[in-house]
Image: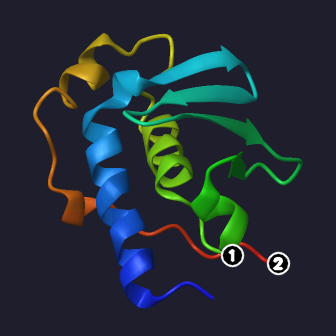
Amino acid sequence: MQSCSAYEAQIEKAGWYIAEWSRFVRVNHDTFRFVGRSATHMLVRSGDGSWQCDCAYARQSVWPCAHARALEKLLDDGVFGPANAEIRSRYEAKPSPLGVVALPAQAA
């Protein structure tokens, strides 16, 4: 089981990844690649609509990783949508990592 501090760290990292939204690259409708500083991760939409990441945290936790949290927020905000120039401009200034809302836990 992950500690509370590990969970909080994932929320903070998601805020950084939202600010660096261009690190997410759409591969196809159900797949994104996240280009990190030390590794590249693949995120795939599962049958229930949630995003599954191949990072170590996601493999060990019932909570979504920072990559999946950030991608979910960016998609919800329409950053990767067709009319995204105005929306993307809002992400040019780095938001506070504390402004990231935690996604609900997924059923195991």
* Residue furthest to the front: 38
- The residue labelled by disc 2 is 108
**In this view, 101 is above or below 44:** below
**In this view, 26 is above or below 51:** above
Q: Where is residue 8 in the image (x, y as percent from the top left)?
A: 36, 76
Q: Position of residue 63 (x, y in %)?
A: 61, 72
**Quick one: SS at disc 1?**
loop
**Quick one: SS at disc 2?**
loop
Asked if residue 101 can be seen in this view, the reply is: no
- The residue labelled by disc 1 is 62
86 and 104: which is toward the camera = 104
Q: Position of residue 38 (x, y in %)?
A: 42, 36
Q: Quadrant of the N terminus?
A: bottom right
Q: In which quarter of the image is residue 84?
A: top left
Q: Where is residue 7 in the image (x, y as percent from the top left)?
A: 44, 77
Residue depicted at x 72% and y 52%: 50
Query: In the shown orientation, is residue 87 left or right of residue 41?
Result: left
Query: In the shown orientation, is residue 38 left or right of residue 87?
Result: right
